[in-house]
Amino acid sequence: MRVFTASLAEMWFSARGRTRLSPDEATAELMLARRRLGQHAPESQRTLELVLAAAAGPATERELAGEAAAVTTFLAALPEPEPARRRGPRRIPALAVAFMFVALVTLCGTAEAGALPAPLQRLAHQAINAPAPPPAMRVPRPTADVTPGPGATGSHLASAGSGPSQEARTGKPSASPKPTHTSDSQGNGNGSGQPTASASAKPTSSTTDNGKGNGGTPGQGGSNSNGNGNGNGHGNGHGNGNGNGNGNG
Amino acid sequence: MLYGRFVLDGDFPDVLRLAARGDAAAFARLWRDTHPPLLRYLWVSVGDTAEDVAADVWLDVARRIGSFHGGEQEFRGWLFTMARRKMIDRHRYEARRPVSPTADGELFERPAPDDTVAAALEYISTETALALIATLPRDQAEIVVLRVVAGLDANAVAQIVGKSPGAVRVAAHRGLRTLREHVASATVTSPGRGGVTL
């Protein structure tokens, strides 16, 4: 069966290959291919050949009259590369601004969450009032200026418990620890006399100071008064302080 | 011996490359080479609006010439394919807005009278030769012009008109046979004009 089918196909193709154009068709192909016929061609064919030759003749002035307009249209219709170049610089700033905006928002959010590194968090604290960095992140200063104050052991610049002070004399017990520095200090003060006694601890150093003071100056006036003041101050970095004061008048 | 000719021939690749870069002189050369056959093809197909359609075709060429790749034969095929699409659009437009035919249109739609054929043969010119071809049925006239005027082979014409090469050959042969009959009748019926003494 396969042999029969193959032979049919071969017969079909071989038949097509042997097919020849008729004389008229061959002449027509010559004329369509714009080839001149011989001198022995029939006159009707030669006439038709001349008609076709005239149809494919040289360009006339009328046909070429629109050359200048065509060139002008061509130059106007050319795709210009400049707009594509302009788009680049316009897109880059837009993307940069968008990126910077997102980065700024992220940075502010991180600063508000207190998740920045300590130096950056400190800057953010100063700039946009973000939370201060946690104490664990603070680095104590090694250069501590230790100057013992009067009436206080190992206290410097700290008036915590510093002996008979003006405040102690007033007999108004007050304790006002004001940690202002990266120091740890403690202060105790006792006062008597005027019912004002104050003990203040102002840790200003990185060292641990303890100060004790007595403001037990007898009060002047017709009354007796005793004042006791205790002050504790802890300063570390920005400092923490506690103070207690008691006064009796 | 070829009586039709391609103007550019071996220079075509360089001319095309320069034209694609926006060189006006190269485009002008390309235009001078291909505009006359394009205009004749459109004139046979759409008549008086041929120049408008040709302008639209060249506008598309100017926009898309940078993306074209091929030789001169392919370029002509590309050009006439665009022209045929424009021509079809024009026919659809005219079908939606019918107009009364002018005297020239009547000339193209009816068989050419013997006097016209005789005049065409006596004062053989491009216009009259195209007028004779335009008397053929539209598909035959189109194929004859694409083969003879545009210089395309049967395969290229088949791609343009969407037919098989065999169908293109048959239509072309029929068109030439009809045209030869018109010419023969002119030589017989118009002996007073001297017949065909070309």
Image (tube, grey):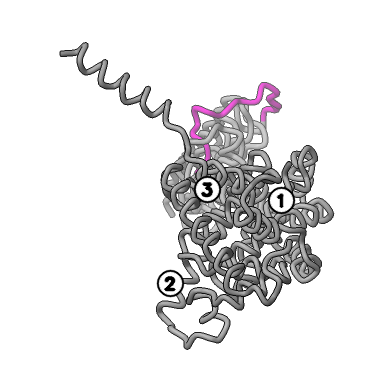
Where's the C terminus of chain B, which quadrant?
Answer: bottom right
The answer to which quarter of the image holds residue A113 is top left
Q: Dot 3: few (<14), some (14–19), or many (≥20) neighbours within 10 Å?
A: many
Where's the N terminus of chain B, which quadrant?
Answer: top right
For image coordinates 54% across by 79% down, the residue present is B107
Between A214 and A78, the one nearer to me in the picture: A78
* Residue under numbered circle 3: B157
* Residue under numbered circle 1: A85
Subunit under mark 3: B
The total number of labels drawn is 3
Q: Is residue A143 rendered magenta in the image?
A: yes
Q: Is residue A56 rendered magenta in the image?
A: no
* Residue under numbered circle 2: B92
Subunit under mark 2: B
The answer to which quarter of the image holds residue B32 is bottom right
Horizontal side of residue B92 vs B13, given as left or right: left
The answer to which quarter of the image holds residue B116 is bottom right
Q: Dot 1: few (<14), some (14–19), or many (≥20) neighbours within 10 Å?
A: few
Same chain for the residues under marks 1 and 2 in the image: no
Q: CA distance from mark 1 to mark 3?
A: 41 Å
Q: Give percent across and percent down for residue B174.
A: 46, 54
Bounds of the magenta segment: A131-148
Q: Give percent across and percent down for residue A44.
A: 60, 57
For image coordinates 78% across by 62% down, the residue present is A71
For image coordinates 74% across by 57% down, the residue present is B31
